[in-house]
Image (cartoon, grey):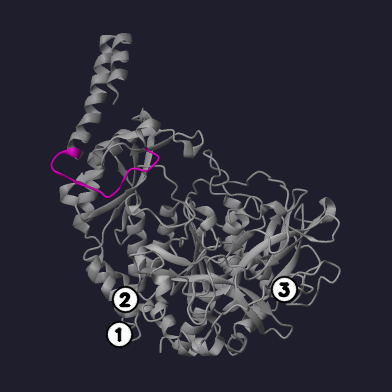
Amino acid sequence: MHLTAGRRVERRTSGLALVAVALLLAALAAPAAAATAGPRTVLPTGTPDWATPAADLGRAAPADPVRLNVVLGLRDEAAATALALAVADPASAQYGQYLTPPEFHSRFAPTDAQLAGVRQWLEAAGLRVGDVPANHRFVPATGTVAQAEAAFATRLDRYAPASTVGRVVRAPAAAVTVPASLAGVVVGVGGLHDSPRSSSPRTSSPQPGGAGDANAVDRGEATAAVHPPATGDQAPPPDAFVNARPCSAYWGEQLATGLPKAYGQVQPYAPCGYLPSQLQGAYGVAALAAAGIDGSGVTVAITDAYASPTVLADANTYATRHGQPAFAPGQFNQVTPPVYRRGFADPAGDTCTERGWYGEETLDVEAVHALAPGANVLYVAGASCDDSDLVAALNTIVDGHLAQIISNSWGGVGEPNPKLDSDLLHSYQQTFVQAVLQGIGVFFSSGDRGDEVDNTTPPTRTADFPASHPLVTAVGGTSLAVSADQRRAFETGWGTARTVLSADGASWDPTPPGPHLYGGGGGTSRLFDEPGYQRSVVPGRLAQYFPGHRGRVVPDIAAVGDPNTGMLIGITQTWPDGSTGYGEYRIGGTSLASPVVAGIEAISDQAYGRAHGFANPAIYRLAGTAAVHDIVDPAKTLAVVRVDYLNMVDAGAGRRTTLRTLNQTQTLHTRVEYDDVTGVGTPNGLAFVNNLGY
């Protein structure tokens, strides 16, 4: 409490009021004293760079609300990690000897007694403890600034750094500590500082309100559209988008003969969006699916933020329109939180752009079903785009063992700061360890911004997280050409530069290729060491890209991601007149690549007769074999011509015609066998399905 505030009250109040104030101060002080009594241990939860004395506005208001996430450590995490690597390695005698959730709890999860100690400590400070998952991984707590300060024996100040452009944010102004008796039990806490800790979709969504990586640099194709009010507590469908014509039904079906040549030849119009049969054909699983090896008996889970209320109807409409079976009763299920935060109807503001996640979920569900129409699909929604909410969704799947495969088409730019975000790193690490131990494969999109040089100061290549974690499979992006007979004509690493057709239609401006726009994410981790499964496959020049450190390199494997050679999806949209209805358009990003590979993995699991779980050790054994397509780009630049409606739905506001490269990958380059654009390559049908894990 501020003593100055107390003195002002004293001058203005009667003796009776002073008694009331004294009682209140005593009530607040009692739990604080109990919570801070005894020796303390410092948590590795640092102060953000922006929390400088110059930006400090003084102590935060004691009554301001806080929402905390206290992360508990595994018992013997080193042993758990070692066992996880053993059960995932085909060369190990323990390969495939997975644990059940109860077995994991009894061996590695925090004990009931440890949880009770944490709960008692938090409640002694006056904090209210929320629902704790069965594996005791984290303890949510809510309360006030004063109560958080008491629990962690710190001081929370308000800051106005230049980086937040006028927004006042909160952070600890002193070390964050816990009782020494909880050292090693409490390993981190989230919610004390306001540094960005959220993720966005890895999709090239065309909606101007979308949150996707590729979309963030591609919104200039369209003007703003209508934004009708929300119904209930959910956002309305995203703004409508229609593929402009001309576009091609398959690679090279229509050529831009009336436009200027580029790279010495007439370029093809971009595909309108590949259909399920084309993707199955390109990746060699069409015959398997026709024979009933279609993912039956396997559950693929998907996590994103929020949940589209029309996703099942949209997916069924899309499937039946394009020659696939609709989801059978019970084949698709959706788990949603009781309340969404930071969404369209949140009084605090729609800072996660809820509507932008609808297209992501729809893409993920329809892509998995396109490749593996027999697989069960489970969608688990995060309460917001905050990492703590997304990792909670992951934990729901893992601790309930609700699926054999999890596809995640989201992430952040770059990697966390281990001194600032220890709680998040521990949360993800422990989730991934438990997933591997239980035979669950976790796939993450590698990102849509290439090497990220354009997004760092000073310009530095960086891998994105969570894809860079060594216990997940990072899926990179390619540009894919599907022939008229539904075969893979060619595939390159995805890297797009863009130039625009001049007003007179006589040239491309600027001269091709133009500035870089987007591309499949890849590179070397600064945070994680090189895992054993990469050592004999990944070239040393990539692992040692940063001097003095052999780092984990991403991606591990790849599939189609280029939005200019993307998938056609179907989704309910909001049209300019305010009505809502189903429509279809092309979409991409490594958001597409992850569910494509997850669908193929489901087919392989079915064929194998059990879950492959964490597939990286098995995937790297396939490097250089016929089980994967080794992607090596041609020396020449490949490109497509793309046409977009400026108002997103029709030619009323005009069109824009652009020339877009396929394989301009900046500092990332495809090479023979492993590379940092496509990993070991892309799955090669029957050879991949039959040889994974053997």
The dot on residue 85 is 2
Q: Nearer the viewer, residue 689 or 500?
A: 500
According to the image, label 1 marks what residue? 92
Magenta stretch: give its range. 36-51
Label 3: which secondary element = helix
Foreground disc of the pair 1, 3: 1
Which quarter of the figure is the C terminus placed in? bottom left
Looking at marks 2 and 1 on the same chain, the residue that comes earlier in the sequence is marked by 2
Amino acid marked by disc 1: Ser
Looking at marks 1 and 3 on the same chain, the residue that comes earlier in the sequence is marked by 1
Q: How many marks?
A: 3
Q: Disc 3 versus disc 2: distance between alpha carbons?
A: 43 Å
Q: Nearer the viewer, residue 190 or 667?
A: 667
Q: Are marks 2 and 1 in contact (CB under 8 Å)?
A: yes
Q: Is residue 50 magenta?
A: yes
Q: On the image, which quarter does residue 58 sit in?
A: top left
Foreground disc of the pair 3, 2: 2
Q: Is residue 308 magenta?
A: no
Query: Which residue is located at x 75 percent, y 51 percent?
Result: 579
